[in-house]
Amino acid sequence: MTDTIRLTAAQAMVRWLSVQMTEDGERFIEGVWAIFGHGNVAGLGEALHGIGDALPTWRGQNEQTMAHAAIAYAKAKGRRRAQAVTSSIGPGATNMVTAAALAHVNRLPVLFIPGDVFANRRPDPVLQQVEDFDDGTVSANDCFRPVSRYFDRIQRPEQLLTALPRALRVMTDPANCGPVTLAFCQDVQAEAWDWPEAFFEPRVWRIRRPEPDAAELAGVAELIRSAKAPVIVCGGGVIYSGAEAALADFASRHGIPVIETQAGKSALAQAHPMNFGAAGVDGSAAANAVATTADLVIGIGTRFQDFTTGSWALFANPVRKLVSINVQPYDADKHGAVGLVADAKVALEKLGDLLADYRAGNADAQSRAEWLAAVDAHCAAPTEDNALPIDAQVIGAVQRAAPEAIAMCAAGTMPGALKLLWQPAQGGYHMEYGFSCMGYEIAGAMGLKLARPEREVICFVGDGSYMMANSELATAVMRRVPFTVVLTDNRGYGCINRLQQGCGGEEFNNMYVDCNVEVQPQIDYVAHAASMGAHAVKAGGIADLEAEIAEARSRDIPTVIVIDTTAAPGPGDGLTGAGHWWDVAVPQVGGSDRLRQAYAKYIENRRKQATVN
């Protein structure tokens, strides 16, 4: 007879999660972020209290930002560890849907456990229940379905016997990795069942490395061998594979220049001689030059997002071919690419063996050196003491003060500016740009620092994104998680204001001065951050900013440094060769000359786009 143990479903869930291990002997689910409500406090709340430090619980301030912290943690851990997030039903659950979409787009593991309605339906409709007039099986949690890699609704305790292993299988699968949602009916959480004791035996989850198909591998090797001007597009899959050293060796041995996506930046340190910098819309002159002339584009661990490809107008060589190395067949076969479905590290090592002494000849060291020199000049401190700095000068100050730091951001002007201008040490870059979610920054910085406590973390955030979500500063203070926030205040949404004008529009509803308000706001960000317990200061200029960054290293709480900046120009304005066209639809008709000129330019650029699958 099988030995059993009687536990509630919630107790069984947390006990099982506490013994799911990595190959390094750590819990795969490090712990659980929780805001309790009537949908999870009695069931999961009791279970989490009971298990204690075997599966620690942390309290945040907002369900979405708790999840952002968990996602940043998983990203910084290279998807080898993750965290869970639980909420009540209703708004607590739907607050997490944006975060689930962020994790889905970025292929990052996080376990969502929203409370759900009563499976027995006796008290329906309960507080916060969303009722579908035509479908009795629907709840608010069905919003998670399109943004989860695996979704399940737990309506009986024994369903956990299959649902939990399925959840971990998805979260540890390099090809299918992403968010998992286990919507947990609140009455079922509290229901007892006799569980097989064997269910709670520790289990090690190994993250596999898929080997390439021999025929596909040979075909890709032949394409590279035949290429005279290849270029490698380095995506986040390089980092998740742990293939940084393999890429450095491959690029150096075969003389193939490397250009970077947002997710792949810092897989190679900027100092590596084959790193030509950022690709595409927010790309460097050196990177975009080799991309434009490349006869073979080799994507490694990238999904070829439009910023990387210049909306498919960047790779302009009429004879160019596309190779995509990816663990996910969906990504490997995009845009008519010759796909190589494999782990990045394994693929690079095997391709290197096949290519032997092959060496390309298009890595122009002079253009790379000229680009980096231009960046240094562009990011230099202002010469006028009373001039408001541009974002590039802020980046330059941080670069000089903290060259080994991890720079992180998510939305607004800074992601493009950092991709273009930040010169990271290896692993010194963390950007959420798959979803480019405003409000990720503060919570993401906390999750990043929890994952990488040995590294200095600098969070760049604009005033607009700070206003979206800032409350996890209080959590970081409570938990003594130190990182530095550089808050650039340009008094509005400066990034979108520039885009609005670039697309022929008038300045409208982005900068506070152009909004329909009676009084222009005068927000004291220093006082606001200080009210949550952070150390907060106003930098009087670039030199002051550099000094404050150095001072922040002595603290065990977050430091917020506010600095006024100008909304214009953009990060690459005045930097020869920076950037590329981006397809943002311009109205065909309108009243202004500016709009007509923008539309004519838009049509001209659209003619350069490749036809893609």
Image (spheres, rainbow, N blue to C red):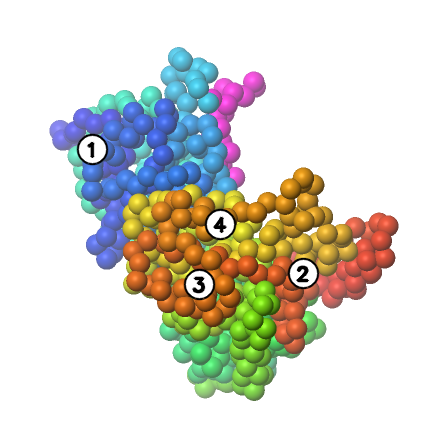
Whether residues under marks 1 and 2 lie with C-beta atoms below 8 angstroms apart, the answer is no
SS label for mark 1: helix
Front-most of 512 and 446?
512
Using the numbered discs, state the Cα–Cα distance from disc 3 to disc 1 in whole angstroms. Answer: 38 Å
Camera-side mark, 2 or 3: 3
Label 4 sits on a secondary structure element that is: helix
| Residue 481 x %, y % | 32, 53
What residue sits 76% from the left and 52% below the top? 506
Query: Which tag is nearer the camera, tag 3 or tag 4?
Result: 4
Magenta stretch: give its range: 129-150
**Residue on which the image places disc 4:** 525
Gap in angstroms between the C-alphas marked 3 and 4: 21 Å
The reply, left or right, for residue 375 in relation to residue 47 is right
Q: Earlier in the sequence, mark 2 or mark 4?
A: 4
The residue that mark 3 highlights is: 407
- Where residue 220 appears, x then y in whole percent? 52, 71
**In the rendering, which numbered label is found on residue 582?**
2
Q: Residue at x 42, y 27 (%)?
A: 89
The question of residue 144 being in magenta is answered with: yes
Label 4 – label 1 distance at C-alpha: 40 Å
